[in-house]
Image: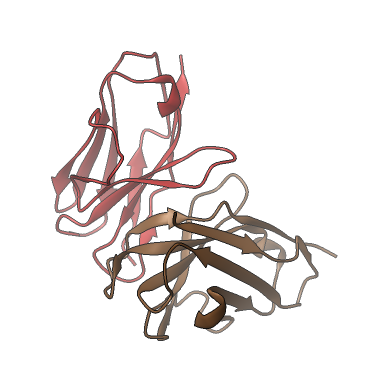
Chain colours: A brown, B red
Amino acid sequence: QVQLKESGPGLVQPSQTLSLTCTVAGFSLTSYNVHWVRQPPGKGLEWMGVIWNTGGTRYNSALKSRLSISKDTSKSQVFLKMNSLQTEDTATYYCARDRLNYGYTGVMDAWGQGASVTVSS
Amino acid sequence: DVQMTQSPSNLAASPGESVSINCKASKSISKYLAWYQQKPGKANKLLIYSGSTLQSGTPSRFSGSGSGTDFTLTIRNLEPEDFGLYYCQQHNEYPPTFGAGTKLELK
């Protein structure tokens, strides 16, 4: 059964770095790409970036200077790091699997339940 | 980036009725549009991709249509579990972008 689960701190101070982990099960990170998407409270979804099965990455240009996505295939984990956090980064952060193995579609067929992150002092 | 405009923002209907949600892209995205359902406490669910292809497990009462810039999600014979938030997303080019969402509520 395909599963993704986000974990990380619920509270981050302004200007600090956010670190989130997405632990996956039921598929291999060597076969599938994984996306990160976030959703501020009461607002819509924003695509943040993707790490491909090959390990390459692509980021939303609006976040590129602050964002890093990496993975540990042996542990079935994908990592998100974003620095210089501000209050507007308060959101639920989701990881999601791309629908196609060994390819890219931009369609996310399995999602985690999300990790809520509040940026506040 | 491709801007996605969804309408209506809110929609009230009763079980058994049919509803349509529209999504308009700021430029042509060919057929590459996906629809997702979001419900509290549950993982987001992919319903349809490439405009009209039902994801495995999506009930046949859901259908998608459109191409270019204008797309529609239609839900026929609404079931109680269909109420929630719906988002469209273009998957034609980077970055993938989403509509602002449509809240389907029980009338």
- Residue B78 can be seen in this image: yes
Q: Examine the rendered structure and indicate whether residue A113 appears above or below residue A106.
A: above
| Residue B18 shown left or right of residue B13 in the figure | left
Q: Position of residue A8 (x, y in %)?
A: 70, 66
At 54% from the left and 42% from the top, the residue drawn is: B42
Q: Residue at x 51, y 37 (%)?
A: B39
Please indicate, yes or no, whether residue A71 appears anywhere in the rendered image.
no
Residue A7 lies left or right of residue A98; in this view the side is right
- Residue B45, percent from left and from top: 41, 45
Identify the image quadrant of the C terminus of chain A.
bottom right
Q: Nearer the viewer, residue B5 or A112?
A: A112
Viewer-nearest residue: B42 or B73? B42
- How many marks are shown on the rendered structure? 0
- The outermost residue toward the right is A121
Image quadrant containing the N terminus of chain A: bottom left
Q: Is residue A5 above or below residue B58?
A: below
Work out whether B82 lies above or below B58.
above
Q: Position of residue A62 (x, y in %)?
A: 49, 74
Residue at position x 59%, y 75% in the image: A80
Residue B59 sits in quarter? top left
| Residue A105 horizontal side relative to residue B65, left or right | right
What x and y, as percent, mark residue B77?
Answer: 28, 18
Q: Who's the residue at 37% across and 20% down the image?
A: B79
